[in-house]
Image (cartoon, rainbow, N blue to C red):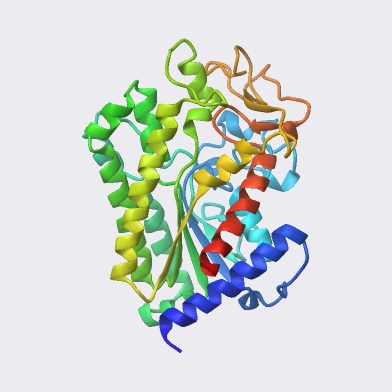
Amino acid sequence: MGTATMVFSRVLIATCSLLVLVLSNSSSCDATKHKNCGFDAIYNFGTSMSDTGNAMHLTPNASEFNAPYGRSIRDAKGRYSDGFLVIDYFAKAARLPLLHPYLNKDVKDKHGGVNFAVAGSTALPREALKKFNLQPFINISLDIQLQWWGNYAKSLCNNSKDCKEKLKSSLFSIEAMGANDYLIAMLRGKTIEELKKMDLVSQVIKANEEGVRKIIGYGATQVLVTGYLHVGCAPSLLAMRSNSSDARDQFGCLKDYNDFIKYHNDLLREAISRLRKEHPDVLILIGDYYTAMQSVLDNHQKLGFESVLVACCGTGGKYNFDHRKKCGTQGVQSCSDPRKYISWDGLHMTQESHKHIAKWYIQDIFSKFRS
């Protein structure tokens, strides 16, 4: 059996198991033998969408680590939500432990994978962003997260050959890298047309592409790269442009912002196609967060969401968001039932949103193997 076929088979088994687990909560994989599920570890790189506690170790006094963050589930401390993230549901479905943040040095047993994602991280390093006159939220880029992985790999593997052997049953995930690069520019008042003209998108895509190459160089045989979702529906950005006459969709989201994200996702798909040709023996998937989120929006009433564009935790105005009084600061309250809200704090989503996105997301991966 060829290498590509072996990789395909492993991930097909994993995805079938993931689908069954998420849809029925049954245990089709032996929880004590993770290799039966196709991969026995997840190594994740990304932003606040999948940060399980790294930012909390860098900036422990940030408002995002105060109550009511994590209010729905005690284990969710350090996450930018009221509870679990998509990456948590993904790990649960694979019968793996929740991913420990790399910067939590108190955790000795990191079987099942490690999370290198940090809230506020950018695809581009600070020096590259400076050329666009942009200042990152935090000086952590994809390159730095990959450097952390390199340091961790020294404790995991003895040499390159050993690394490739140990990583053949691991899944590497790069999640929504570039979202903060764009958000920084948007908050600086850059229009969508300006963003496209300033070559920022192509640089972000290139950073993702090079990140995948580096991961493959370490020995990865299974890589998942996710696009981004509807920034045009974020209460924080809607509040910023509440007085504008910009075109809105049927939900009231900003069409130009969402169209821009689709533009990014299309270019990311092209990059993944190039990488697949370069590395035919490596399984490289693209995760379609955008369509997953669109499914939640289209079916929000059936799913029990009463509010699409209003933040659960916040204060002020049509969208319950005021950047001067953010969730987690004194006097700012959260809604009585986060399960009825898509947005948690105006920029990040609720656990309930993540749960439904994860369910769609895993089904979508499965369907790609069926086609």
State whether residue 309 is above or below residue 241: below
State whether residue 107 is above or below residue 118: below
Which of the 4 image quarters holds residue 28?
Answer: bottom right
> Picture coordinates of residue 225 (x, y %)?
44, 56
Whether residue 286 is visible to the viewer of this picture, yes or no, is: yes
Residue at image location 38% in from the left, 64% down from the top: 215
Please, which residue is most extreme toward the bottom here?
Answer: 1
Tell me if 324 is positioned left or right of 150 in this view. Answer: right
Tell me if 173 is positioned left or right of 143 in this view. Answer: right
Viewer-nearest residue: 270 or 208: 270
State whether residue 306 is above or below residue 124: above
> Picture coordinates of residue 121 (x, y %)?
42, 42
Which of the 4 image quarters holds residue 124?
Answer: top left
Residue at image location 55% in from the left, 61% down from the top: 365
> Picture coordinates of residue 161 (x, y %)?
38, 82
Tell me if 363 is positioned left or right of 333 in this view. Answer: left
Residue at image location 54% in from the left, 23% down from the top: 252
State whether residue 332 is above or below residue 7: above
Whether residue 122 is visible to the viewer of this picture, yes or no, is: no
Viewer-nearest residue: 32 or 248: 248
> Picture coordinates of residue 93 (x, y %)?
67, 61
Residue at image location 67% in from the left, 47% down from the top: 355
Q: How many marks?
A: 0
